[in-house]
Amino acid sequence: MSGSRERVLARVRAALADVPDNEPVERPAEHGHDEHHFTGRTLDVLVDRLLDYKALVERMSAADLPGRIAAALERRGAARVAVPSGAPGEWFADATARRIADSPEAPLSVAELDACDGVVTGCAVAIAETGTIVLDAGPDQGRRAVTLVPDYHLCVVRADQVVDGVPRAVRLLDPVRPLTWISGPSATSDIELNRVEGVHGPRTLEVLIVEPAV
Amino acid sequence: MSATFLGLPPFPEAAREAVGDSQTRHNLHKATHTIRGKRDAVVGELGDDWQRLRSAGEQVKTHTLRHLDHYLEQLEESVRRAGGTVHWAADAAEANEIVTRLVRETGEQEVVKVKSMATQEIELNNALEAAGITAYETDLAELIVQLGEDLPSHILVPAIHLARSQIREIFLDQMSEWGVPAPPGLTDDPKALAEAARVHLRELFLRAKVAVSGANFAVADSGTLVVLESEGNGRMCLTLPETLISVVGIEKIVPTWSDLEVFMQLLPRSSTGERMNPYTSTWTGVTPGDGPQNFHLVLLDNGRTDVLADTVGRQALRCIRCSACLNICPVYERTGGHAYGSVYPGPIGAILTPQLQGMSSEADRTLPYASSLCGACYDVCPVAIDIPEVLVHLREQVASSPGHLGEKAVMAGADAVFGSPKALDAVQRAAGLAGGNVPRHLPGMAGKWTDTRDVPDVPGESFRRWWNEREEER
């Protein structure tokens, strides 16, 4: 199809005959917009926005995390949970659910993932202003399929992973990695433009925010 | 065979019929007013910064278009480096051929699809069907349209013209034809309808080997493609299959990853009226052990370079398909999307469709007139496309084409009268003398105008005459 490549490029160049040859391709790096648009404390805003989009949220200290993970899985009735192989073992110190490890080297099949009651992961970045959690397939987040097929996603967010707004998050993220931005559980606005939670992605998103001890 | 826009009547005819459909008007009124309220709220949250972001969005897109050849080559190189294969399609037929061939090479007979305007535009599903390949739409609204053998009527929510009770009936009647049937006791509660869609598509997602998508953005410097969605059907299609084919218009490029700082704020707020859409997926070529291991990018021209060649009209290529202009438009609200006879309805469709298709048909030539030029579309556009400016520009093209002889003669006459003080004085004096004898209704074609308007009273003396006499008396 190299013929079409040259044809399309030639048509583009002909269409741009009015653009001076010496017009620079370089642009100023800054767009001049704000970093975020809220007043108040970052973590409070994150919690507010997560709740607004119908996620379940809890805040806790690092010491309480294993107990809270165990309690959340129990509340959910999750007996078999998928866990990326790089997730810290201490997260599950108190949990009784059976953990099923997944890694790119030893991936679970789609059917095996479908048989899991939930998945527990960390995250790469969280954006307070939009209530968004970003996964970048890091060791504690796993392959994209792991957080997609099970119907329940329990996500651990450390306070130091939370940024105020979208611009900072974009700068921190590496586009080479496959990214999934998650803002609440799956939803649709396709019926009369009213938002309804729960379609194909996990229908329950639970977020545990770990704050430094005061 | 899926429904097609080909051969639908021109806008004035289609619109007249559409406004008579009270159910659709009711549905559209409700939906557009709901989304306007949501959008206003989340755009308002950004205060003055919204206009800075809007201006940044405009600048990034304008800059990209002015150097499109450079960025296309950069994108191609970036995607190749990341393990993807890049194809170029000059038109719809070629794009359909490429996708059909790629699907055939996998040996599969079915593909799952993420909602994509580009593949709607080229009518890919029909081409695949002709090749014996079944394309399953997985976006809820696209699914409704596909099951109902209907046509999309909105860029973002193709089934916006349907109310929940109509959707329920389509699910009950049609789901069993395509796969898992709807549960017999299905109600019209949106939650129940969403659940029925989940069950209907679940097994398909888990078995699918090939997916076809579009992209909201293609980042030239990193080779990253970006898809924004809500339901998770996009994630399913972009993650689970072995082969992913993305058909992307050449205008979807942004130069750098950091440009997404702007667009990831503009698009969700402008589109669904959310601070952020539930899911966004980004991928760069192929990631070993994670997601599709074969990735094909099909770069689509199909008339875009013709739009680019028009220095006024090319701004339409900045469009990020948010649909805010449809939701705000008083004409769209009343006629709905089908009247525009194109996958791109509403104000953006009225400038994009005729330019993409070259204004060759009567339907295309009427579209620039499908507007009251109120300008609301320009105000809400997140990349500041001056839609009224382009509409007027296209009307000029229609008017300067052959035909419209009577109108041209009247305008030439008016030009002669208004261009000469003497001629104007003579006409005004004659009209003043005629006074009440000026007819209230004009005969022939001009009668269409006077049917809905009164001819104003003609004063006995014109302002110019009164002024001149006053000056002489001094």
Image: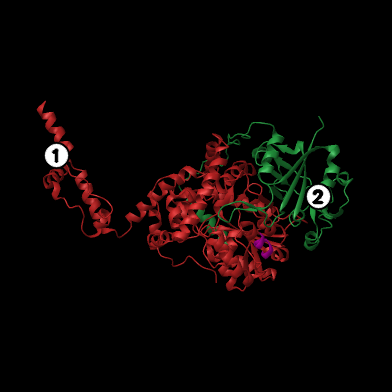
Chain colours: A green, B red
Q: Are marks 1 and 2 on the same chain?
A: no
Q: Is residue B270 above or below residue B1?
A: above
Residue pictured at 69% horizontal, 71% vertical: B107
Chain to which mark 2 belongs: A
**Element type where label 2 sits in the image:** helix
In this rendering, position of residue A81 left or right of residue A164: right
**Residue range (magenta):** B195-200
Q: Main secondary structure of the magenta part?
A: helix
Q: From the top left corner, tell me how far across and down residue A116 is, in percent.
A: 80, 58
**Which residue type does callout 2 highlight?**
Arg
- The residue where tag 1 is placed is B461
Indicate the quadrant where residue B259 lies.
Answer: top right
Chain to which mark 1 belongs: B
Residue pictured at 42% horizontal, 52% vertical: B331
**Which residue type does callout 1 highlight?**
Glu
Q: From the top left corner, tell me how far across and down residue B167 is, in percent.
A: 57, 62
Residue occupying the far top of the picture: B474
